[in-house]
Image (tube, grey):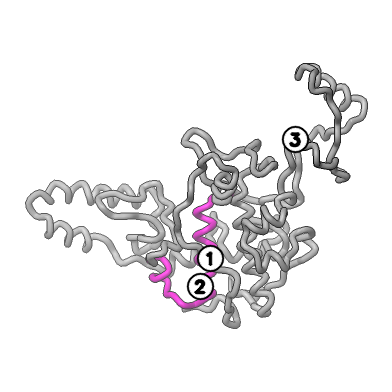
Amino acid sequence: MAKQTTNLVKFKYSRAVKKGRINKFKGREQDRQDDELFNESWRSSARVGTSAMVDDGILQTGISKYRHWFSFLKMALEMQQQEAVLIYKKKEHKIKVDESMYVGWDLDKVLTSKFDDWFFKQNHRSLFLSDISRVLKSNEKASNAENKITIEFDSHRRITDVIKDIRRLNQDENVFKSDDYKTDFVINGRVIDSVLQNRFNALFLKLEDKLTNKEILTHNNEYIRATSKSKEFDGIRHGYSSQQQAKGLLDTSEDAEYLKSIGASLIQQRQDKQDAIDRKLKTAVKEPNWAYTIHELINGSSSTTGAKEILLSVCDGYFLKNPNKTYT
């Protein structure tokens, strides 16, 4: 197998994420938090949006993107400790995290903590989102933080009058920002949860160097998820983890239609010759080119960003892509 680094990397804190069962929202705040960690819908008719509340905070978008950023950063920090040199596009890139780009992240905690603990319990969510307005309890003190404002209202007043008061106060005092909340940590690129997880897992497992390309793509833990909309037809599951074409990916409608047409023609004959048809179906499909798929996942293509470029961008303080550098 081709080398991904000049020296073998051993991971203590990072790991590949196997496909697991995600609990859906059941009404409890912790369930909602757990659900949003994986960017899943918590109602069939409702998805996490820009005003979705999590533990007294408003998410600007689903926080799944920050979980992926965190995972790549943890990987980079472990590689930096071992003075790892990544091989990308026939060049050597020494892994070094620009700490000046991660003020407030507490990188030592990133290395040793799980994302949900770091984000919620250690309150690093404030790096990415703003708080909602709330009523202070009788035993609470008003915050002295620069971004907090304490306003007193008579609870007997009508809500419409209170709203008018807020508008008047803002006009006189200019206490509220007119623009949207902005974080210093901006996502450059489109985040698709399963695609990012595939790329992270592929790079991690290649760096760990314990599994072959085929084993990575066909592992029972489903480290590489199927991303095609046509995940299964005629009893065959399709996608990255069970690719069927020698050219590698089975994520195009062209490939899917081809195999569907084969399946349709064979189904007719299966009534009388079930066993023979199954054998024919197997021989109609070429042996996959496992290396092609892995190469695309970790190195990218002309239209996709591979895991190695994501990792190098994260070292420089950006996610998914560094807008100032191409690493070529």
Amino acid of disc 1: Ile
Residue at label 2? 206
Which residue is rendered at x = 67% and y = 70% of the image?
77
Q: Earlier in the sequence, mark 3 or mark 1?
A: 3
Q: Which mark is residue 328?
A: none
Left or right of residue 160, residue 73 in this image: left
Tell which tag, 3 or 1, sits nearer the viewer.
3
Can the viewer see residue 310?
no
Name which of mark 2 and mark 1 comes first in the sequence: 2
Camera-near label (2 vs 1) is: 2
Instruction: State the CA–CA distance, disc 2 to disc 3.
Output: 48 Å
**Residue 199 lies in the magenta-colored region:** yes
**Residue 119 in the image, given as x and y percentages of width and height:** 67, 55
Please provide the residue range marked out in magenta.
191-218
Q: Which mark is residue 134?
A: 3
Rendered residue at 79%/23% (across/down)? 155
Asked if marks 3 and 1 touch (Cβ < 8 Å), the reply is no
Looking at the image, is 12 positioned above or below residue 285? below
* Secondary element type, mark 2: helix
**Residue at 92% in and 25% down:** 172
**x, y percent for residue 153:** 84, 25
How far separated are the C-alphas under marks 3 and 1?
Answer: 45 Å
Q: Which residue is mark 1?
A: 298
